[in-house]
């Protein structure tokens, strides 16, 4: 994990070798030794300053922690789906599946190694959400999420020297999201709708937008919408739930909905998840309760991704 004591030990190691026991073993003068020590301290301070954003709830907003990643590999952990893994690495789930010889409905198993250094191809099949129904997303060795708030160990790893430091700062052990399954019901969508890309979009929450989409400065790959704990979170469009859990650091309790072969939407920081993987949902259906899991305040973080790439939800949602 990314920790101050470990980083200090690493930063000090070369200086212990040269200046151990209070003398210069490298044959340097006292003045030079002092200068090198000062340089080492400066380097240490720079490294420590980077810890300010390490392993915080804003990691998902940092471009350096957001892929696409085309190197290394990922070892599948219990509870993951190909959709959630592709989301983590900024890849189109179809492309990642093709690269690893995995076809719909994308079955994976815990312990399976997915190569990230391979690039797949995506062939448009005219596939739609309705044609996917009856084919729930395949989850690695997990049945329906339990209707409890208990915690179980989950997470993922990426075995690559190039990004090992990123993984250490991300962390890989998370708690299963509290899920309260309920019978699927069609709930009329409140307010206006807007059709974009043949999908009828609705606002997932009525709260005030407190942070907009941004690809520069403070990167935000979606919209942050204010609210009170327990507020209803609604599906922005009809689709199928392809992930419901808490395995992606920075998103808290997360739901990912597949709308068609190109578009996914995500709902993060929920207090309670009210749907299960494989469940079909209608536009406006209540799918979660707003919360602060993985965040510093109650809010909804809402994203839309097209072919694996974040897009500005404001271009899809209707004017208020």
Image (cartoon, rainbow, N blue to C red):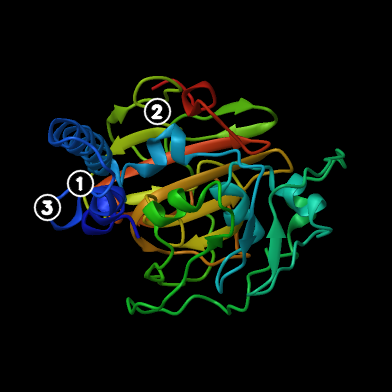
Q: Which callout, 2 or 1, points at the residue further toward the start of the chain?
A: 1
Residue 60 visible: yes
The numbered dot on residue 22 is 3
Mark 1 crowdedness (10 Å alpha carbons): few <14, some 14-19, many ≥20: some
Nearer to the camera, 196 or 170:
170
**Residue 78 is drawn in which quadrant?**
bottom right
**Residue 311 is drawn in which quadrant?**
top right
Q: Position of residue 309 (x, y in %)?
A: 60, 33
**Quarter of the picture holding the C terminus:** top left
Horizontal side of residue 5 vs 55, given as left or right:
left
Q: Nearer the viewer, mark 2 or mark 1?
A: 1
The numbered dot on residue 219 is 2
Residue drawn at point x = 75 percent, y = 62 percent: 106
Q: Which residue is mark 1?
A: 24
Q: Is residue 178 above or below residue 298?
A: below
**Quarter of the picture holding the N terminus:** bottom left
The numbered dot on residue 198 is none
């Amino acid at each position: 994990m990314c920790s101050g004591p470990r980083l200090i030990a690493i930063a000090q190691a070369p200086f212990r070798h040269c200046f151990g026991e209070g003398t210069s073993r490298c044959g340097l003068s006292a003045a030079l030794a002092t200068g090198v020590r000062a340089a080492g301290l400066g380097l240490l301070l720079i490294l420590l300053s980077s810890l300010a954003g390490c392993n915080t709830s804003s990691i998902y907003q940092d471009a350096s922690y957001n892929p696409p990643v085309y190197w290394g590999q990922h070892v599948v952990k219990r509870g993951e789906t190909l959709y959630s893994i592709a989301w983590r690495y900024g890849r189109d789930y179809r492309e990642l599946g093709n690269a690893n010889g995995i076809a719909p409905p994308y079955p994976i198993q815990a312990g399976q190694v997915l190569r990230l250094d391979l690039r797949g191809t995506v062939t448009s099949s005219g596939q739609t959400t309705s044609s996917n129904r009856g084919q729930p997303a395949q989850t690695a060795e997990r049945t329906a999420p339990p209707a409890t708030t208990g915690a179980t160990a989950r997470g993922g790893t990426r075995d690559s020297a190039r990004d090992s430091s990123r993984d250490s700062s991300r962390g890989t052990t998370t708690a299963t999201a509290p899920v309260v399954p309920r019978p699927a019901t069609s709930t009329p969508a409140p307010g206006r709708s807007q059709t974009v890309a043949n999908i009828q979009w609705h606002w997932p929450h009525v709260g005030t937008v407190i942070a907009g989409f941004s690809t520069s400065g403070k990167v935000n790959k979606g919209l942050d919408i204010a609210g009170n704990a327990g507020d209803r979170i609604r599906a922005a469009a009809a689709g199928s739930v392809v992930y419901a859990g808490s395995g992606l650091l920075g998103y808290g309790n997360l739901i990912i909905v597949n709308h068609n072969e190109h578009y996914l939407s995500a709902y993060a920081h929920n207090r309670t998840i009210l749907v299960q993987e494989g469940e079909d949902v209608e536009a406006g259906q209540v799918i979660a309760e707003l919360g602060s899991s993985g965040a510093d305040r109650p809010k909804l973080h809402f994203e839309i991704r097209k072919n694996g790439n974040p897009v500005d939800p404001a271009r899809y949602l209707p004017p208020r």
